[in-house]
């Protein structure tokens, strides 16, 4: 067993690209476990009969989304230079997973999940949208006092989870949406629910997570 | 107008969010091989007609994928059966089935290499052709259509799917596939007719081009003769084998979504000398070829490094017959010390356990369960099927297993075996109960017995190829007896659906006319017949009626020894006279010992005399 002072907590910022769009949250955890095993870094494992790599993903990304800004913590039994960690993670990463930043964080810091405040997303539609219509739809949605939605047989109010929602212009003059949704434990807004409330089906768009906002 | 790859993929992206587990249909995995489409000459789609989750862990497919892609002028890509929701979505959106690498319709490929590992994928195979935009029947394909070749364990009887396949590769395909590609490329250079390609293929050893053979029938429906109609067609078509095992995988593809077997697998030995009379794999995969220990361990280490998996599995028909089993396990233990991995070593023979082996195994994988396959409940029946084992030997092994610290044993038995009586079925109950009480005596209340029951299906190229499949009603009576026998015994029993076995019995020993049945069943919606939730016997019965064929003719009929069997023209390396003698011996209850001690001239050495000279270590454990 390594000395307690050697234990290192590493935070990785990474992008999840189109080829991993349909790798769900549980599969992503397993993907990271394998990636860490392949990296050859001195990964810290849980104790017990079936040891698992200790890792912590900030926030589940719904199936079908891509992201520029995912966060994950893992632990090592011994320290390594940041450049080494980054190089080994990059070597072990599957196509579609791009390591953007690696840093060491304090062992005593709260778990990533409990630091989560909000997520930002950008939506691109597969088909042309009229800016005027979309502006109108957004305005009338935001004007509501409550937006009652049902997911997994539970009814909740989506309205307070929407911190921001606006029509934006994307590359090639395409009209899209940007939104910031609350993402606190027990109060997490889903972009697909907002889009559904606006009248779009999940076959009409691609959602990209652009930022995770943690408590300062 | 064919769909461009970009266009196709754009349309697929829209339907993916509507289906279950869309990650099956996107490719893009670690160690996938994608070559720019126009950079290679020959495009091969390797088709596995079952769901990605199962097909992707198939080692045979992985080996072909690797060796074909090592060639610069070849791109090998993958295609699997879409689940029914995805099939509906593809059809609705008019998107053809595509390869996972380049997202190309199957009809864009030069060659489709189809794996047919078991008979219950036949409807999926037809469905894949249809979804991929390839004509179902070989006779309807024209020059620009892909060449459809098929191989795998099921094609030792190619007849049921003969009209759908342009050419079969019988036996081990690792070398033959390159000969097929060479013939294809030469044909392209000559710009010949499709018939010329098939004629070139028909000449290759181990290749069977069904349209060059005529099958005639007797008035009673049995076969009168199978005759080549082309001067270049082989008769018989002798299976291909390799003198020694091909190198193990060096590049392991790692799926991004959960699949059935997430582990590093290496084949440690091919073939088996035990001669169990029910065992298709044991008969058709002769002779024995062992992989050197160092090669096994190197492959496992490399696989673990590349994949990040935490499980390894050693594949063979009978692991404990591997000559160097103890040193191999020593090596595995070394591996275990280096890394935290689980090791599974399936297919251990009951009588081959020494105390030493037991100690070694316990050190490798402490606790957990132990699997034994006595196959039959009485000594008499075990002699008939040539898996001789006395009750005493079995109980000694069981005692030793419990004494070494295991407390769960899984027992595999078959019902519906030739000459089986109710007393043999009761024997399964008595034996299992005796094993449980032995376990209780040694490890107490922790002792667990799980009994797995499967239905015997007579298979081609085995000594039991002539015997009837037991009628489902009588199978059901045996299952009822087992249920009653285990009632209150704290023994868990699992069994497979006798109706599903019946389908396998029809397809395994069918002739060319059965193709109509498969076609009608597929047209009326049969898919994923190996899957309980999709299997529908009524569809098949209707398909038999539609094809004007009697299902019992194929399943429950005793075949005459003089009868010309539908696979008579396929030589699996074993003499028919040997199979006949072995069948005769089974009727007399006479066993045939392991042939590593004494050669019984099964036919392997006669068929592959020259190849044996190329085999290392004097060749294949044949005396």
Image (tube, coloured by chain):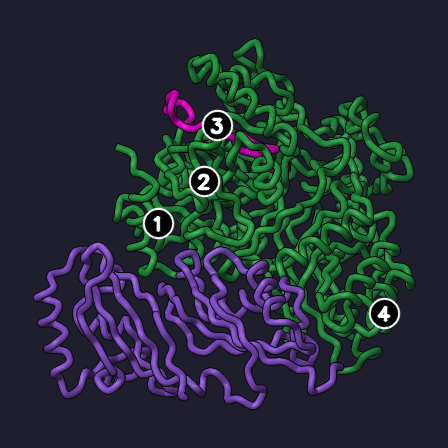
Chain colours: A purple, B green
* Residue B542 appears in view: no
- Which is more N-terminal, label 3 or label 4? 3
Q: Are marks 2 and 1 in contact (CB under 8 Å)?
A: no
Find numbered disc 4 in the image and state the secondary structure of the residue it sits on: helix
Contact (Cβ within 8 Å) of mark 4 with mark 2: no
Q: Is residue B412 above or below residue B553?
A: below
Estimate the spatial distance between the alpha carbons at disc 3 and disc 1, rounded to whole Å.
Answer: 30 Å
Badge 2: residue crowd in 10 Å (few <14, some 14–19, many ≥20) = many
Name the residue tied to disc 1: B87
Q: Position of residue B210 (x, y in %)?
A: 51, 23
Write the residue at 83% across / 58% down.
B331
Q: Is residue B178 visible?
A: yes
Real-space CA distance between mark 1 and mark 4, rounded to the nearest whole angstrom? 51 Å
Sequence-wise, which precedes: disc 2 or disc 1? 1
User: How far, Cα to Cα, is label 4 from label 2?
Assistant: 46 Å
Mark 1 vs mark 4: tell me if same chain: yes
**In this figure, which residue is indicated by the disc labeled 4?**
B399
Comparing marks 4 and 3, which lies closer to the viewer? 3
> Could you say which is closer to the camera, residue B398 or residue B472?
B398
Judging by the rendered image, the residue that carries numbered circle 2 is: B125
Give the Cα separation between the discs numbered 4 and 3: 60 Å
Disc 3 marks which residue? B41
Sequence-first disc among 4 and 2? 2
Give x and y (percent) for residue B65. Answer: 57, 41
Residue appearing at x 85%, y 69% in the figure: B399
Say which of marks 3 and 1 sits in front. 3
């Amino acid at each position: 067993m390594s000395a307690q002072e050697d234990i290192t907590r590493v935070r990785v910022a990474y992008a999840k690209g189109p080829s991993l769009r349909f790798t769900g949250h549980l599969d992503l955890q397993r993907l990271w476990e394998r990636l860490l095993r392949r990296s050859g870094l001195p990964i810290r494992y849980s104790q017990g009969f079936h040891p698992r790599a200790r890792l912590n993903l900030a926030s589940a990304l719904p199936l079908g989304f891509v992201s520029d800004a995912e966060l994950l913590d893992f632990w090592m039994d011994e320290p390594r230079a940041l450049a080494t960690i980054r190089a080994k993670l990059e070597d072990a990463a599957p196509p579609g997973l791009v390591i953007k930043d690696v840093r060491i964080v304090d062992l005593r810091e709260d778990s990533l999940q409990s630091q989560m405040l909000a997520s930002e997303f950008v939506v691109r539609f597969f088909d042309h949208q009229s800016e005027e219509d979309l502006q109108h739809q957004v305005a009338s949605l935001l004007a509501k006092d409550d937006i009652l939605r049902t997911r997994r047989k539970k009814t909740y109010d989506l309205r307070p989870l929407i911190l921001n929602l606006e029509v934006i212009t994307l590359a090639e003059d395409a009209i899209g949406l940007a939104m910031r949704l609350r993402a606190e434990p027990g109060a997490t807004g889903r972009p697909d629910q907002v889009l559904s409330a606006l009248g779009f089906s999940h076959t009409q768009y691609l959602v990209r997570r652009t930022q995770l906002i943690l408590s300062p | 107008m064919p769909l461009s790859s970009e266009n196709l993929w754009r349309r697929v992206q829209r339907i993916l969010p509507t289906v279950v587990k869309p990650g099956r249909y996107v490719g893009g995995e670690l160690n996938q091989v994608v070559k720019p489409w126009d950079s290679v000459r020959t495009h091969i789609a390797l088709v596995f007609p079952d769901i990605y989750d199962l097909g992707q862990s198939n080692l045979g497919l992985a080996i072909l994928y690797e060796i074909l892609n090592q060639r610069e002028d070849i791109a090998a890509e993958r295609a699997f059966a879409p689940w029914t929701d995805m099939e509906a979505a593809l059809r609705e959106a008019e998107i053809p089935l595509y390869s996972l690498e380049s997202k190309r319709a199957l009809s864009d490929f030069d060659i489709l290499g189809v794996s047919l590992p078991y008979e219950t994928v036949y409807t999926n195979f037809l469905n894949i052709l249809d979804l991929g935009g390839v004509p179902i029947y070989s006779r309807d394909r024209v020059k620009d259509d892909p060449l459809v070749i098929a191989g795998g364990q099921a094609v030792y009887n190619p007849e049921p799917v003969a009209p759908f396949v342009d050419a079969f590769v019988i036996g081990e395909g690792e070398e033959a596939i390159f000969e097929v590609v060479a013939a294809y490329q030469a044909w392209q250079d000559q710009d010949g007719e499709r018939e010329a390609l098939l004629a070139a293929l028909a000449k290759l050893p181990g290749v069977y081009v069904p349209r060059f053979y005529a099958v005639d029938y007797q008035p009673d429906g049995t076969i009168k003769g199978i005759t080549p109609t082309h001067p270049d067609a082989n008769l018989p078509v002798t299976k291909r084998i390799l003198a020694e095992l091909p190198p193990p995988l060096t590049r392991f593809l790692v799926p991004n979504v959960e699949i059935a077997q997430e582990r590093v697998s290496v084949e440690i030995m091919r073939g088996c000398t035990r001669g169990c009379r029910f065992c298709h794999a044991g008969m058709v995969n002769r002779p024995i070829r062992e992989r050197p220990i160092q090669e096994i361990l190197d492959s496992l280490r490399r696989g673990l490094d590349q994949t990040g998996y935490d499980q390894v599995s050693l594949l063979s028909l009978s692991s404990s017959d591997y000559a160097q089993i103890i040193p191999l396990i020593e090596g595995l233990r070394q591996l275990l010390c280096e890394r935290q991995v689980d090791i599974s070593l399936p297919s251990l023979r009951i009588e081959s356990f020494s105390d030493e082996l037991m100690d070694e195994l316990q050190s490798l994988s402490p606790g957990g369960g132990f699997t034994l396959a006595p196959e039959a409940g009485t000594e008499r029946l075990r002699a008939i099927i040539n898996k001789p084992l006395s009750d005493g030997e079995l109980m000694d092994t069981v005692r030793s297993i419990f004494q070494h610290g295991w407390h769960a044993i899984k027992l595999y038995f078959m019902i519906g075996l030739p000459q089986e009586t109710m007393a043999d079925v009761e024997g399964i109950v008595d034996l299992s109960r005796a094993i449980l009480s032995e376990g209780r005596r040694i490890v107490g209340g922790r002792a667990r017995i799980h009994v797995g029951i499967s239905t015997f299906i007579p298979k081609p190229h085995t000594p039991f190829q002539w015997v009837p499949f037991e009628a489902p009603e009588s199978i059901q009576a045996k299952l009822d007896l087992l249920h009653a026998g285990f009632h209150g015994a704290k023994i868990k029993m699992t069994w497979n659906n006798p109706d599903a076995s019946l389908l396998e019995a029809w397809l395994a020993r069918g002739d060319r006319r059965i193709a109509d049945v498969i076609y009608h069943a597929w047209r009326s919606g049969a898919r994923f017949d190996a899957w309980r939730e999709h299997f529908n016997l009524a569809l098949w019965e209707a398909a038999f009626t539609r094809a004007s064929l009697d299902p019992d003719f194929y399943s429950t009929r005793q075949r005459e020894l003089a009868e010309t069997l539908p696979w008579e023209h396929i030589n699996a390396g074993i003499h028919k006279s040997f199979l006949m003698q072995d069948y005769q011996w089974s009727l007399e209850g006479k066993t045939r010992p392991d042939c590593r001690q004494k050669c019984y001239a099964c036919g392997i050495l006669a068929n592959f005399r020259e190849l044996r000279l190329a085999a290392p270590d004097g060749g294949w454990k044949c005396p």
